[in-house]
Amino acid sequence: MTTVNSEKLSSARFAEATDAFVEVFTASVDFDQRMAAQDIQGSIAHATMLAKVGILTETERDAIINGLNQVQQEILSGEFVWSIKQEDVHMNIEARLTDLIGIAGKKLHTGRSRNDQVATDIRLYLRHEISQILVQLVRLQTAILNLAEQHADTIMPGFTHLQVAQPITFGHHLMAWFEMLVRDKERLEDCCKRVNIMPLGAAALAGTSYPIDRFMTAELLGFSRPSANSLDSVSDRDFAIEFAAAASIIMMHLSRFSEELILWSSAQFDFIDMPDAFCTGSSIMPQKKNPDVPELVRGKSGRVTGHLVALLMLMKSQPLAYNKDNQEDKEPLFDTADTLINCLRAYADMVPHIRAKTANMYHSAKRGFATATDLADYLVRKGMAFRDAHEVVGLAVRLGLDTGRDLSDIPLAELQQFSGLITEEVFTYLTLEGSVAARKHIGGTAPETVKKAIAAARLGMTS
Ligand code: ARG
């Protein structure tokens, strides 16, 4: 007689017990127990469907559902004992169910496999995470809109190459952040359409010979439809890769916001005051107030992009259908969702408390000859060729630099030495206010346009 390891999955097939290290090495229960609620939800729907089509009796179905609810309670209360011997979340729950209700528990796995079960669990889990992420993303959008509204008229320098380029309004700058988040939200919502398709019923890879009703299970679980091909359903994790890509783009955007907040809160820029509650001091330099939250978010963007690359590499070259490689999808996926939600939350909490130092922003715009383009445009409107106007303005800027004055502070007579086309009304264009007010077309920085953009954004968020 061959001795078999009675604990082992598919034990009759095996003559030897699993190597102790291999048992630990191949187990996923330490991390996939996070999907317990989804696993139970999927099993309840599966059992309900099996009873409907006559594969389980109603008594068996009820025993399974009651048993699973009890397992759920045990997990929530912390009494549940997770065992590495049962390898993963699916086997742990099924084993406990069988302890509780006996033979009916062993019938739950009829017409399915862990391959379609795990794919279903991940999709249910991700769908829930995306909904939570969207809540935080919308909170951040609202916070940005509120700050932009307070600063629709606040003038600051706009930069290219991090050199002062043209004056803009702070509200306009913030609305650029808002627009990035609009696209980020669309990407997540779009990704969710492909997440929300049900693999259950694909079984191990080829489907099942039982007369299952996949439409019923899909409806019970809130999926838009059952998947179309069983091999594809159990193997591809492209939906997770897509999510990680959307998450990486959001984190990339947050890293850009972070970089700006960090620069602006430095003594050299001094454009904003970061809320104390979101900063820490230095253990050795008493004067320091470090922008820790934006710095950490900037750092975490690398970590999320790393997870995207890990998932892509995990999937690359895998033959159909399920391979154990796919067990490696969970940790990067979970950490991507956790990191993203935490970063968005930190930002949504922090942004309402950012205080703009409007006088410093204004003076900085004035120091950088930000209205030089406006002077050139003025000369062009008066009939000068743009290249000549560029030259004239260059001379005026040189004079301003040599004498420590902004263009708007150079008297008319002195400006006229560069071109006779310049007259008194030039000063309406040379002021920072005149410069921003002139850019009032859609998408421009004029305060009135920014206010319209904010109003349109608010409308778009409620529709
Ligand atoms: N723990 C496995 C995973 O995460 C579940 C599926 C296992 N299927 C199998 N045939 N070994 O992918």
Image (cartoon, grey):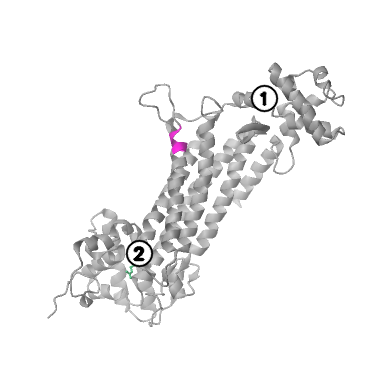
**83 displayed left or right of 131:** left
Could you tell me if the residues under marks 1 and 2 are in contact, i.e. CB atoms within 8 Å?
A: no
| Residue receiving disc 2 | 39
Q: Which mark is residue 366?
A: 1
Q: Residues within 10 Å of mark 1 (few under 14, many from 20)?
A: many
Q: Nearer the viewer, mark 1 or mark 2?
A: 1
Residue 17, picture quadrant:
bottom left
Magenta-colored stretch includes residue 231: no
Q: Position of residue 90 (x, y in %)?
A: 31, 66
Q: Which mark is residue 276?
A: none
* Relative vertical location of residue 332 with respect to residue 443 in this rendering, above or below: below
**205 displayed left or right of 364:** left
User: Type of residue at label 1?
Assistant: Lys
Q: Is residue 177 visible?
A: yes
* Relative vertical location of residue 75 with respect to residue 182 in this rendering, above or below: below
Along the line of sight, the residue nearer the viewer: 186 or 149:
186
User: Type of residue at label 2?
Assistant: Asp
Q: Which residues are magenta?
A: 291-295
The residue under the point 40% across, 27% down is: 281
Question: Which of pointers 1 and 2 lies earlier in the amino acid sequence?
Answer: 2
Q: Position of residue 175 (x, y in %)?
A: 61, 41
Secondary structure category for the residue under label 1: helix
Separation of marks 1 and 2 at Cα, in angstroms: 61 Å
The residue under the point 50% across, 59% down is: 242
Task: Classify the position of the N terminus by image quarter.
Answer: bottom left
Q: Position of residue 185 (x, y in %)?
A: 55, 52
Q: Residue furthest left?
A: 1
Q: Is residue 199 visible?
A: no
